[in-house]
Image: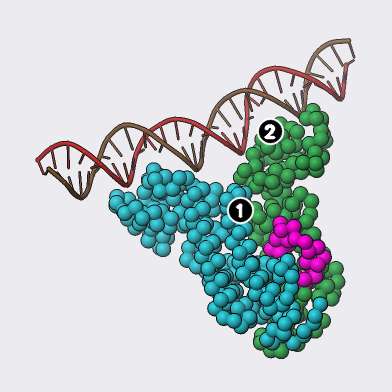
Chain colours: A green, B cyan, C red, D brown
Amino acid sequence: MTAIEQTQARPRGTRLPRRARREQLLGAAQEVFVAQGYHSAAMDDIAERAGVSKPVLYQHFPGKLELYLALLDQHCESLLQSVRGALASTTDNKQRVEATMDAYFAYVEDEGGAFRLVFESDLTNEPAVRERVDKVALQCAEAISEVIAEDTGLSSDQSMLLAVGLGGVSQVVARYWLASRSEVPRETAVQLLTSLAWRGIAGFPLHGAEGGPAGQHG
Amino acid sequence: MTAIEQTQARPRGTRLPRRARREQLLGAAQEVFVAQGYHSAAMDDIAERAGVSKPVLYQHFPGKLELYLALLDQHCESLLQSVRGALASTTDNKQRVEATMDAYFAYVEDEGGAFRLVFESDLTNEPAVRERVDKVALQCAEAISEVIAEDTGLSSDQSMLLAVGLGGVSQVVARYWLASRSEVPRETAVQLLTSLAWRGIAGFPLHGAEGGPAGQHG
DNA sequence: CTGCACGCCGATCTTGACCTCCACGGCTTG
DNA sequence: CAAGCCGTGGAGGTCAAGATCGGCGTGCAG
């Protein structure tokens, strides 16, 4: 109840430049969508939260869906950038794993809980939403998969499976960690998961058939 | 359009015993909820799919939410049984991993795609739904966590993190595998993931688990 | 054969949420 | 100083979907 007022501070009479108003509306919409989900969120709520009336909302966005999509696109892009940045931050593969894990944790911990729009959307039946959510997951997995394929020589199908798995672990555990308010600090959790994932992924030898003794390289 | 008629075969004039009618309604509701999600699914659709009129639906269930919850409970229980069964099916930990992975794959491959109700519900804002979904994930993770804690001696917090991770991998990859219609057969995918997970998890041995080469204490 | 009970159907009501129309006030120009 | 303009605000229309009431047909007891 304290951080909200940054988007509500104005006493409902202020005139704002168009760009700023739009940003403020996006902020208000994000708060409401995150707190209530798409369906329970009413345009009235968003307008009220922003301290404006409904018509101004419709002067900036054609409808509820487009407003939601604008936010979704924004945070999908953000996640993708984080993951790609983490993968590019080093050439050491173990550090890559750690950086990527940490990117997910940071993303989930990010202000406003916007990750819920991407990971816990309640509008996945809408094709436009489904497409974006699937696409960002796929793109993240592809980015990870490239590294895996390059390093292990697995087929693209197989390395994609592993990449989806690594992305999935990060996402699921980061959410669990956030929700459970676990005693274990973020860095420890990341380290733990990195150990798990790195030992797992480093176990795949360069040329293919699983089951062989661990031939790991760095 | 072919497998549907099993619940729609009757030409909308048949009288059914109460119990059978209820089961049939549950089947129809599952099909519609899976195909369209909770919000897009209309009671009209469910009634039509079942070949009855809306009032009979309300004679069997108090409302849309309760109907949904009945299905959700059913499939949550099913998942939990599968996972527990997999963990209890052997005492060899690697086979446990494999059996658990396979349980998730079998679950998502199950008829009717009912896993979507548990893993992709669009009603998580409803507390009753959220509670059930969270609870089943937690119970699965706890079941896995017990084995991990017993075998590695990690703290319960930490083994829970790993257990959530393993459950998360299984769930996410199984869904991806199903959605992507990957060329790689189910058994291969399970093997691949099992390798990943087992190498990862076997890297945490405290009590000299079988096959664990490096035993580090700390 | 006939009256009764029971479960099912068509048609309807209401609620709630998305999306626009009439009055008001501050800024600009002559 | 005055008049107009443009954006803001409250009140309302529409529609979809959840939830419900008067007929109907069937099977049984007497």
Which residue occupies 63% across, 80% down? B93
Residue range in magenta is A172-194
Residue A161 visible at all: no
Residue D20, picture quadrant: top left
As drawn, A118 above or below C18: below
As drawn, B2 above or below B154: above
Which residue occupies 71% across, 34% down? A48
Measured as percent of width and height from the top left, residue A39 is found at 61, 45
Q: Which mark is residue A56?
A: none
Check the picture and name the quadrant holding the C terminus of chain B: bottom right
Q: Mostly what secondary structure, the magenta segment?
A: helix
Measured as percent of width and height from the top left, residue D10 is found at 67, 24
In this view, the residue in front, A151 or B139, is: B139
Which residue occupies 43% across, 55% down? B26
Number of callouts: 2
In this view, the residue in front, A200 or B48, is: A200
Give the labeled residue for mark 2.
A54
Amino acid found under the numbered disc labelled 1: Arg
Numbered disc 1: secondary structure: helix
Which residue occupies 37% across, 61% down? B6
Residue B127 visible at all: yes
